[in-house]
Image: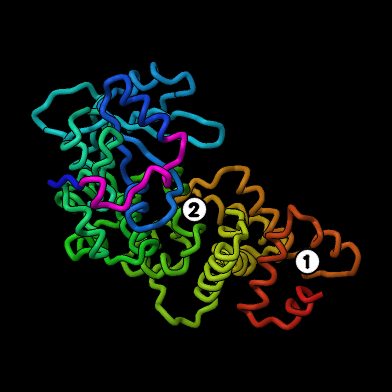
Amino acid sequence: MSFVPREKHSISRKDISINSLKVLYRLNKFGYASYLVGGSVRDLLLGKKPKDFDISTNATPEQVRNLFHNCRLVGRRFRLAHVMFGVEIIEVSTFRKQHIKSLKVNQNVSKKTKHGILLRDNIFGSIQEDAQRRDFTINSLYYCIADFTLHDYVNGRQDLKKGVIRLIGDPETRYREDPVRMLRAVRFSVKLSMIISDETAKPIPRLSMLLNKISSSRLFEESLKLFLTGYGYLTYLKLCEYQLFQRLFPLIPYHIALNSTTLIERTVVQALKNIDNRFQSGIYVNPEFLFAAMLWQPLLEQVKILTKKNNLSNYDAFLVSINNILKKQQSSLAIPKRIATLIREIWYLQLRLTRWKGKGAYKLINNSKLISAYDLLALRAEVENHQEISKITRW
């Protein structure tokens, strides 16, 4: 445990959002402890600009709500307070502590499955206990607004300097509590260019199947963070290394080898590289393009199977396959209906755009809502080295 005075760390209030400072100061004014915590502290120490600012306090969610008229309480698994300032949301959590088997509590407060997965985690405690409950050491650093000191209870600052991703506590127990931590370990290691410590990495391939116990809606949200934030290709390689990728995309063969020449792998790799390049150029990529591209080859494989076994026309097999592929993928990632509808449109248009006949096709390509369909067509031309499709996309 260490306390770093203001003059010995690099965090400055001028780099912290005004709204989060308002929340920190108001909590402190009314007698509550208030700390900036998690990724924002980590990023500030690394000289990066935080995406958002989270706050931790000894005030309960209800007490936080009583202090802010622009506050709402969210979550069942983790009860949190969201203080809203227009589009900016400051997330405020209450200090939590470890679960003790002998401790009898209401299941609405603390609950685990028989596999050890936490369904409720609302046992409140001290800041020291809260530090032990967080996932990685580098995310368990606290910036105190009262005296501007940095509090480190788990040697997170040391791991940050060494560039190490390390779980707090026993890795297997922590992964069983929340299997999504395996995805987060991979995401942080790629995003921050850090290594995963041996003890943190070792159980991941063996426990990867625990992701099947996580809700598909939560995994969908995680997939967007993994693949749509500028480092999707490197994340993909790391997910394959730890046998996690197939848990998210079971329709894509999990035995994907590096430098492979199969069409399905080239499509996945090139799609992710294209998305990364666009993100780095400041161009937003829609989620529907990601999933339409990733699942395009499995869709074609399904079409081949149906035309051969069921004697269907290619068009009918295509329509049936779209439903089958989306249904199977939904079991892993709960793609929202709105996005699933757009994926269907992108796939339908692959048939229409390849039947290019002048002005009509031009109107489709020029429709801003269907740009993703053109992007997939261009990807196919690139990956398949298809001369006719290349000619159409150039036109």
Residue 51 position (above or below residue 88):
below
Q: Position of residue 185 (x, y in %)?
A: 31, 57
Instruction: Decide: few, some or many residues near mark 1? Use Cα within 10 Å; few <14, some 14-19, many ≥20.
Output: many
Figure colour scheme: rainbow
Label 1 sits on a secondary structure element that is helix
In the picture, which quadrant includes the C terminus?
bottom right
Q: Is residue 177 visible?
A: no
The reply to whether the magenta stretch includes residue 114 is no
The residue wearing badge 2 is 224
The residue wearing badge 1 is 353
Label 2 sits on a secondary structure element that is helix
Total numbered circles = 2
Q: Closer to the camera, 312 or 215?
A: 215
Q: Residue at x 40, y 41 (%)?
A: 53
Marks 1 and 2 in Cβ contact (< 8 Å): no
Q: Looking at numbered disc 1 in the image, what kind of residue is underneath it?
A: Leu
The reply to whether the magenta stretch includes residue 8 is yes
Residue 94 position (above or below residue 153):
above
Residues under labels 1 and 2: Cα distance? 28 Å
Instruction: Decide: few, some or many residues near mark 2? Use Cα within 10 Å; few <14, some 14-19, many ≥20.
Output: some
Magenta-colored span: 5-20
Q: Earlier in the sequence, mark 1 or mark 2?
A: 2
Q: Position of residue 36 (x, y in %)?
A: 33, 39
Q: Position of residue 282 (x, y in %)?
A: 60, 60
Q: Looking at numbered disc 2 in the image, what kind of residue is underneath it?
A: Leu
Furthest-right residue in this view: 359
Q: Position of residue 354 (x, y in %)?
A: 77, 70
Q: Is residue 126 visible?
A: yes
Quarter of the view holding residue 27: top left
State which mark lies toward you, 1 or 2: 2
Q: Residue at x 74, y 76 (%)?
A: 389
Q: Residue at x 45, y 40 (%)?
A: 17
